[in-house]
Amino acid sequence: MRKKNVMVAAALVAAATLTLSACGGDTSKDGGQSLAEVSTPTKTKAATVLDRPYTKPNLVLKDTHGKSYDLREATKGKPTLIYFGYTNCPDVCPLTMSNIAVAYKKLSKAEQEKLQVVFVTTDPDRDTPKELGKWLKGAGNPDFIGLTGDFPTIQAGARQIGVSIEPSTKDKDGKVVSMHSKQVIAFSPKTDAGYVLYTDEATAEDYTADLPKIVKGETP
């Protein structure tokens, strides 16, 4: 009976994590990942270890300098965090990147040089390379990688790791919003597989505790 309860709890964590929503808006629909891919929560509430790690997305986009960036090649063998969001997000996106930035600054110089933090826009029509670079300096860290490109390519890459995004739309007040799942996925430097998932409830303290292990490819 106890084992069954643990499985149910894991499923609930997954369902709560992978909802598709506009930043600052209500959740609307499931992000599409199979609940069977998620194991029991790790020691931090915000982190979940995946039973079936994700293959790193096959994405070739433009970085903040307008240069071609092959995600798989550029981050091969490196600990990597990937997050999909947009610069005009009023709350979740800047908070998530800020929390990661706080933890990043507490890593040693050697650890910082290894860790790749990648922010992929879900609103490429407005998020130009220049805008991404400017935003990352304020909401995250200038060492973080910002990527943009055509929407279909970004959407297809996101789906490869269970992240759902939809084209930007206007709300009833005429404000442009981008619908996207809000998880951060950590990829191991040992396997290049996405093995840990963080919800938008992850705090700076959560990342501070976990990133040294992520850098080593260990389970937090």
Image (cartoon, rainbow, N blue to C red):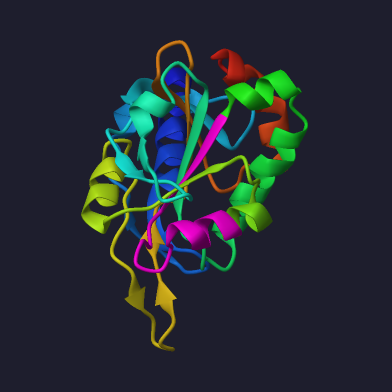
- Picture residue at 47% right of the left edge, 44% below the top: 83
Per the image, is 133 magenta?
Answer: yes
Q: Name the foreground residue: 23 vs 27.
A: 23
Q: Does 80 sit above or below residue 152?
A: above
Q: Is residue 220 visible?
A: no
**Picture quadrant where residue 55 is located:** top left
Q: Name the foreground residue: 18 vs 175.
A: 175
Q: Does 125 sit above or below residue 13?
A: below
- Picture residue at 50% right of the left edge, 60% below the top: 130
Which corner quadrant holds the N terminus?
Answer: top left
Which residue sits furthest bottom? 173
Does 68 sit left or right of 93 as displayed?
left
Residue 209, image x and y in percent? 71, 27
**Picture quadrant where residue 3 is located:** top left
Q: How many marks?
A: 0
- Picture residue at 58% right of the left edge, 37% below the top: 46
Residue 188, image x and y in percent? 47, 19
The magenta segment is 116-134
- Picture residue at 40% right of the left edge, 19% below the top: 192
Which corner quadrant holds the C terminus?
Answer: top right
Per the image, is 200 magenta?
Answer: no
Q: Is residue 79 visible?
A: yes
Residue 98, image x and y in percent? 67, 50
Q: Name the foreground residue: 102 vs 47.
A: 102
Residue 6, image x and y in percent? 47, 25
